[in-house]
Amino acid sequence: MRMNSKRKQSLQSALISALILRAALLAWHIATLPTKSAAASPTTLTPEQIEYQKLLGKDPTAETKKTTGFPTLAQMGETVAKNLADPFYDNGPNDKGIAIQLGHSLLRVGLGFGLAALLAIPLGFVIGMSPMLYRALDPFIQVLKPISPLAWMPLALYTIKDSSLSGIFVIFICSVWPMLINTAFGVAGVRREWLNVAKTLEASRLRLAFEVILPAAAPTILTGMRISMGIAWLVIVAAEMLVGGTGIGYFVWNEWNNLSLTNVIFAILVIGVVGMVLDLLFARAQKAVSYVD
């Protein structure tokens, strides 16, 4: 009975989402429809002015179609089909397929995020188990946490002298804090009853950490990782716009410089879809380690 209710709610949610998407596409189509307008009113022009306009190749008496300049759904469809038809092409530094650009961005995010996890999770574990260490490190965490990751970019470029590695460093620095704080919070919030039972059973400190604290804190740790991944994927686009070279952020900036608005919108949609997929993966992992259905 409960499964039927969940399935019914899922179908209703999917239907509402489909209706919202259809309404948005319809609004887009209507907003980009061409409108008829006269280039100039013949009644306000003298015969000499009308003749002069015709000599310039303009007919003031003819109706013209005026558009908003924003790409239509048909134009967007052509752009999407063109980009997905050959996503791995490579015609030089400034002309690469969307899959190659996306691969560079995901690689930078993966490396920066992985390095942050290697530092933040063990350190958060230690901080969560030691109130004294938490109080000692908390001022430094509170000072460094609010700093925009992009503020580190000039320093990274100056010291590392490599745009790609600087991008990885920026991802690392923005991913550390949510993981560190959530890990420390999750470890510190483990129920005292469980810890007392483990002590009663004379469990070693290592066994206590891996068999009691880690499973209990895992949902909170994954929440921090999920937040960090969302921030990392957001920051990499801005970082790649600054440093250039490769990546989905550079693709957006390069297409804007080429005045290709359809490619810019396509890249924005790709960024959103990839971000949603990454978030869903962490949500599944979070649900897998959670004790609540």
Image: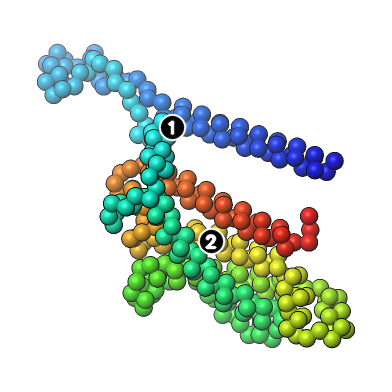
Three-letter residue code for mark 2: Ile
- If the image is split into quadrants, where does the N terminus sit? top right
Position of residue 266 in the picture relative to residue 256 (left or right): right
Disc with the residue nearer the chain's start (2 vs 1):
1
Residue 285 lies, in percent from the top left, at 66, 60
Residue 220 lies, in percent from the top left, at 69, 66
Which of 211 and 188 lies nearest the eye of the viewer?
211
Q: Residues within 10 Å of mark 1 (few under 14, many from 20)?
A: some
Residue 153 lies, in percent from the top left, at 40, 69
In this rendering, is residue 191 above or below 29? Answer: below
Instruction: Say what secondary structure mark 1 lies in.
Output: helix
Colour setting = rainbow
Residue 7 lies, in percent from the top left, at 75, 40
Residue at x-position 60% and y-position 34% = 18
- If the image is split into quadrants, where does the C terminus sit? bottom right
Which of 222 and 107 lies nearest the eye of the viewer?
107
Please name the residue that numbered disc 1 is placed on.
73
Position of residue 131 in the picture relative to residue 280 (left or right): right
In this rendering, is residue 58 above or below 254? Answer: above
Please say whether residue 105 is visible from this viewpoint: yes
Please name the residue that numbered disc 2 is placed on.
231
Position of residue 256 in the picture relative to residue 136 (left or right): left
Residue 129 position by quadrant: bottom right
Three-letter residue code for mark 1: Leu
